[in-house]
Image: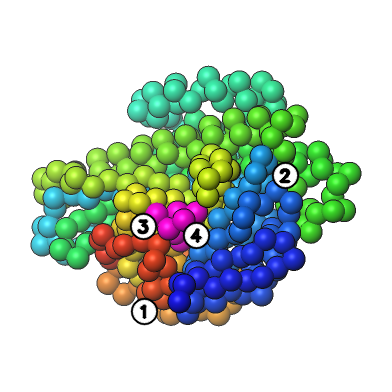
């Protein structure tokens, strides 16, 4: 018996790795809408963390021929994970980890205040030299994109490079199955990626205005390869993905630097992973060159390392891909939400959250209730549903969690 279920549609089939976790009706409807598009190649692949998303379904792998759907990529372009192994043993950690959490919070701007404008705690006010140096490699291409699309160049950019953001973005100190310390974080291309995504989603809708009546959902407007804005979007989205990779590396360097000041001497281990889970790439599948959009999914080619995080109170996993062709060599990007942020805030209390994150040094106040572990699917069920997509290399349990 195959590990995936097939959902037949009026378009291409949907292959869903959702045994034991299911697909909510709203997400299923979104997936069926995507499956009906004429640009979809072969089938859609759905990961076990699937849930309803803005524009397109989170936890979906969308293969397209000669076209890109900007809303399927989304506005958190290049969002992803980074994890670094260390030689530090858990017995060397201090009993009280609050100073370590505070040091990380001081080293990496996080969250959002002042409406994201002047005084925002989540952005640099004096850009560090390391960030300025990294920006020099990104700035020329950014300027070229902004020269063609003026709106993109107006807003936060270098001042958010090396910063965490808010929502479900986080930094964690974790222990693996041998009690060695890891640093792990989750973030993407920040405000500039959001600006690029939002701008091109609206541009695609405008470009397809005459054909919109044939779309099952106007958010699924797409650029055909060779059309006026396809090349510009692909250039911009690839740039945002580079920004995101750089953003995670800069933050990880800052986290390691902060940890070195508060922990006994340690070295970095052999394993480090920096992977996207919201992005588009040109790939070869089933004998064809196609564009693969992973909206909340990680590439899991044979032997490729990826990261599947749990919630604030659950384990996370370093995985090695099995290269399953039916999933377009992909796996889930996390546990996946089972309820909206608003529903989580209505349903759970600070006391509930404190109990769920017992033993973890993290914020335990009303502002993080929307990220409480109960708002997510059980990570063990998510992992069981994709046993034919990845092998587990390391299991990580957080002892410190910094949320935006």
Dot 3 and dot 4 residues touching (CB under 8 Å): no
Lower sequence index among marks 4 and 1: 4
| Residue 375 in the figure: left or right of residue 10 | left
Please identify, in this view, whether the residue under mark 2 or under mark 1 is nearer the observer. 2
Q: Which residue is mark 2?
A: 222
Q: Which residue is mark 3?
A: 322
Q: The residue tagged with tag 2: helix, strand or loop?
A: loop
Please identify, in this view, whether the residue under mark 2 or under mark 3 is nearer the observer. 3
Q: Quadrant of residue 204?
A: top right
Q: Measure how far apart labels 2 and 1 are at the Cα level.
A: 45 Å
- For the image, the number of numbered tags is 4
Instruction: Work out whether residue 105 can be spotted.
Output: no
Q: Measure how far apart labels 4 and 2 are at the Cα level.
A: 24 Å
Q: Measure how far apart labels 2 and 3 are at the Cα level.
A: 31 Å
Lower sequence index among marks 4 and 2: 2
Q: Which residues are magenta?
A: 323-332
Please identify, in this view, whether the residue under mark 3 or under mark 1 is nearer the observer. 3
Dot 4 and dot 2 residues touching (CB under 8 Å): no
Q: Which residue is mark 1?
A: 355
Q: Measure how far apart labels 3 and 1 are at the Cα level.
A: 36 Å
Dot 2 and dot 1 residues touching (CB under 8 Å): no
Mark linked to residue 326: 4
Q: Measure how far apart labels 4 and 1 are at the Cα level.
A: 40 Å
Asked if 89 appears above or below 359 in the picture, the reply is above
Q: Residues within 10 Å of mark 2 (few under 14, many from 20)?
A: many
Residue at 81% from the left image edge and 38% from the top image edge: 207
- Quarter of the image for the N terminus: give it: bottom left
């Amino acid at each position: 018996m195959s590990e995936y279920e097939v959902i037949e549609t009026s378009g291409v089939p949907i292959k869903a790795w959702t045994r034991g976790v299911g697909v909510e009706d709203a997400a299923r409807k979104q997936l069926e809408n995507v499956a009906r598009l004429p640009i979809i190649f072969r089938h859609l692949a759905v990961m076990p963390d699937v849930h309803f998303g803005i524009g397109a379904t989170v936890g979906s792998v969308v293969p397209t021929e000669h076209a890109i759907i900007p809303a399927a990529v989304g506005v958190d372009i290049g969002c992803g994970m980074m994890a670094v192994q260390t030689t530090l043993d858990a017995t060397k950690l201090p009993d009280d980890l609050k100073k370590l959490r505070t040091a990380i919070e001081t080293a990496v701007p996080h969250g959002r205040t002042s409406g994201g404008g002047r005084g925002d705690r989540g952005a640099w006010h004096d850009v560090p030299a390391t960030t300025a140096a990294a920006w020099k490699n990104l700035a020329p291409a950014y300027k070229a994109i902004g020269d063609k699309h003026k709106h993109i160049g107006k807003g936060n950019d270098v001042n958010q490079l090396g910063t965490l953001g808010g929502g479900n973005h986080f930094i964690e100190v974790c222990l693996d199955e041998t009690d060695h310390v890891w640093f792990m974080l989750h973030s993407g291309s920040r405000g500039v990626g959001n600006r690029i995504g939002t701008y091109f989603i609206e541009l695609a809708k405008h470009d397809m205005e005459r054909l919109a009546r044939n779309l099952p959902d106007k958010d699924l407007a797409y650029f055909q390869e060779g059309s006026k804005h396809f090349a510009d979007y692909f250039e911009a989205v690839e740039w945002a993905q580079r920004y995101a990779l750089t953003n995670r590396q800069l933050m990880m360097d800052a986290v390691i630097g902060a940890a070195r000041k508060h922990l006994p001497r340690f070295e970095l281990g052999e394993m480090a992973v920096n992977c996207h889970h919201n992005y588009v790439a040109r790939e070869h599948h089933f004998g064809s060159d196609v564009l693969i959009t992973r909206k909340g999914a990680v590439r899991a080619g044979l032997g490729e390392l990826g990261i599947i995080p749990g919630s604030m109170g659950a384990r996370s996993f370093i995985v090695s891909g099995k290269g399953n062709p039916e999933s377009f060599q992909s796996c889930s990007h996390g546990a996946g939400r089972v309820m909206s942020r608003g529903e989580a805030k209505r349903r759970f209390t600070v006391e509930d959250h404190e109990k769920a994150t017992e033993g973890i040094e993290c914020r335990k106040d009303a502002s993080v209730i929307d990220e409480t572990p109960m708002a997510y699917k059980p990570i063990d069920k998510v992992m069981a549903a994709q046993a034919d997509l990845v092998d587990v290399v390391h299991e990580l349990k957080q002892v410190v969690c910094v949320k935006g």
